[in-house]
Image (tube, rainbow, N blue to C red):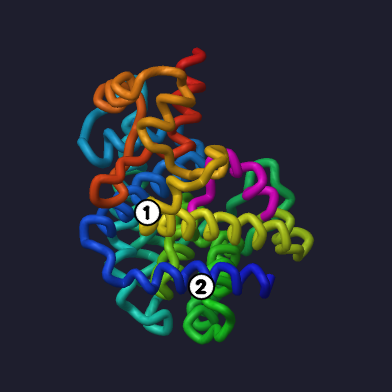
Amino acid sequence: MDDILKQLQSKKEKIDIHKSLTSELLKNLEEWFRIELTYTSNAIEGNTLTKQETALIVEKGITVEGKSLTEHQEAINHAQAFDYIKTLVVKKREELSQGDVLDIHRIILNKTDDVNKGKYRTVVVRLKGSETILPNALKVPMLMEEFITQLQTDLSNPIKVAMDAHFKLVSIHPFIDGNGRTARLLMNLLLMQTGYPPAIIRKEDRSAYINSLEKGQTKGNLEDYYSLILKAIDRSLDVYLEAIEPEKESMKENISEKRFYTTGEVAKLLQVDPESVRRYVRRGDLRAVKLGGKFIRIDKADLDTFIEDSKK
């Protein structure tokens, strides 16, 4: 793991050099991560909103036909919870408290479970289809006190601290619902406090993610879990690097290596003219993001979704 951590540190240092990033670029990146994290984190928990539907709800306040009120509220809640953890980034890790974790959870369950939001569970819970045995509810307050104390004093690599905090929190499973979303947000808060971008666990990695957690909880083997999270952090660092130096990105000859495509590249891939691509974007069929200045980009994942939807 040490070699990977050094590679991630090296990428972060390249980003640190560009501390003079324009406020516009930073805002665009934050907005991209806000939607991406909201969509993926909720999708892992079974929310059926697409990324585009999530963006419409969060950014435009539009109601999506055929989707439940709960799914709408989950999107709103997660985006607001991400906004909240950004306010905690200025805190030192040793200043984080149980109250901060409870506040994140309170926002996550707002208007979907007002009875249990921001409260530790008092009943037995089990994970469907899992052999993991969760702690007795009576032990949760003590376990959470120990968890925060260890979090405040851990001297490990900051990335490992963040990964371990996520794993330990979901393993304590202190809440009736919202444990995964709260744990992922806490992990990302810890990453952001040390200058790393948030880690996005993709929807397509859901099974691998859940299996890696269970393997850690039942067999004490965290190798798969660490590998999955480290790859997620690496992808997020690449998003920043591609936004910072788009001209270098455009020089890549192999289009399959790219994370973001230009309008012309999408037109070539779809075998249509560039104006057709712009029309797809204007209609909301294909989502585009502005990564600063004049550089409009289309995420490869969004393009893949568009292609799959076109086949239906």
From the viewer's perspective, tell me whether residue 222 is left or right of residue 282. right
Vertical order, 220 against 194 (above or below) = above
- Would you say the magenta stretch is mainly helix, strand or loop? helix
At x 50%, y 67%, the residue is 11
Task: Return the x and y of residue 196 as percentages of the image width and height.
Answer: 44, 67
Identify the mark nearer the N-term, 2 or 1: 2
Figure quadrant of residue 93? bottom left
Contact, CB < 8 Å: mark 2 with mark 1?
A: no
How packed mark 1 is, by other alpha carbons closer than 10 Å (few <14, some 14-19, many 20 or more), is many
Task: Return the x and y of residue 17 as percentages of the image width and height.
Answer: 38, 73
- As measured in the structure, the alpha-carbon distance from the residue carrying label 2 to the one carrying label 1 is 38 Å
Q: How many marks?
A: 2
Q: Which residue position is annotated with label 1?
A: 243
Secondary structure under the numbered disc 1 in the rendered image = helix
For the N terminus, which image quadrant?
bottom right
Q: Nearer the viewer, residue 150 or 300?
A: 300
Q: Which mark is residue 144?
A: 2
Vertical order, 150 against 267 (above or below) = below
Q: Which residues are magenta?
A: 200-212
**Res. 176 visible in picture:** no
